[in-house]
Amino acid sequence: MGIYRKIFWPLDTKYIIMKVDYGRLKWEEEKEKREKKALENHARLSKLFKEDRFAFERERKRMIDEIINSVEDEEQKNRLRAFQESWDKKMRGAGSRRNRFVLAQTLFWEHFHETWQPAIQKFNYLLNNKQSIKNPNP
């Protein structure tokens, strides 16, 4: 999505035609708006966390439900709800703030090594084999 514009050089009658991509410009402006909104939301949640933990927890759960409810596939919604419930249950059992942080790190890396890394390796294998089939002599 772009428009071609004539750009005149000073002191000359020649011009060049330059393609101006308004879609990209619009995306950049929207990105800045999203970033500003995210920073404002973060500041609001941070303040809420410090002042009223109960209200913060309600807002956190509301935001999570909003994301889960935005998913169209019912099966995916159920998996996300089950995952969130198991996450919340594990975090409640962690105890202190430090223990929750360590548990969150442990769960993240465990999930990475057991789920993401094998999937990435499989995808890489499929891509490389597909390339070698298309072009056996790179």
Image (cartoon, rainbow, N blue to C red):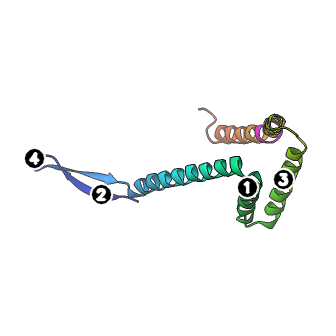
Task: State the extent of the magenta-drawn residues as a range.
Answer: 112-117
What amino acid is at disc 2? Answer: Tyr
Left or right, 127 with reference to 35: right
Pointer 1: what residue?
Answer: 60
Mark 1 element type: helix
Say if mark 3 contacts mark 2, CB within 8 Å: no
Crowding at dot 3, Cα within 10 Å, few <14 / some 14-19 / many 20+, comes out as few
Task: Check disc 3 and report the residue beneath it.
Answer: 83
Residue drawn 72% across the image and 42% down it: 123
Main secondary structure found in the magenta portion: helix
Looking at the picture, does residue 126 appear above or below residue 37? Answer: above
Q: Nearer the viewer, mark 4 or mark 1?
A: 1
Q: Residue furthest front?
A: 51
Which quarter shows the C terminus?
top right
Crowd class of label 1 (few under 14; some 14 to 19; many from 20; radius 10 Å): some
**Nearer mark to the viewer, of 3 and 1:** 1
The amino acid sitting under disc 3 is: Phe
Query: Does the magenta portion include 63?
Result: no
Q: How far apart are labels 3 and 2 at the CA level? A: 50 Å
Q: Residue at x 54, y 54 (%)?
A: 37
In front here: 13 or 80?
80
Q: Distance of mark 3 from mark 1, alpha carbons?
A: 15 Å
Amino acid at the residue labelled 4: Asp
Q: Earlier in the sequence, mark 1 or mark 2?
A: 2
Q: Which residue is mark 4?
A: 12
**Mark 4 to mark 1 CA distance (whole Å):** 61 Å
Q: Identify the residue under disc 2.
A: 4
Secondary structure at badge 3 equals: helix
Label 4 element class: loop
Which element type, helix, strand or loop, lies under badge 2?
Answer: strand
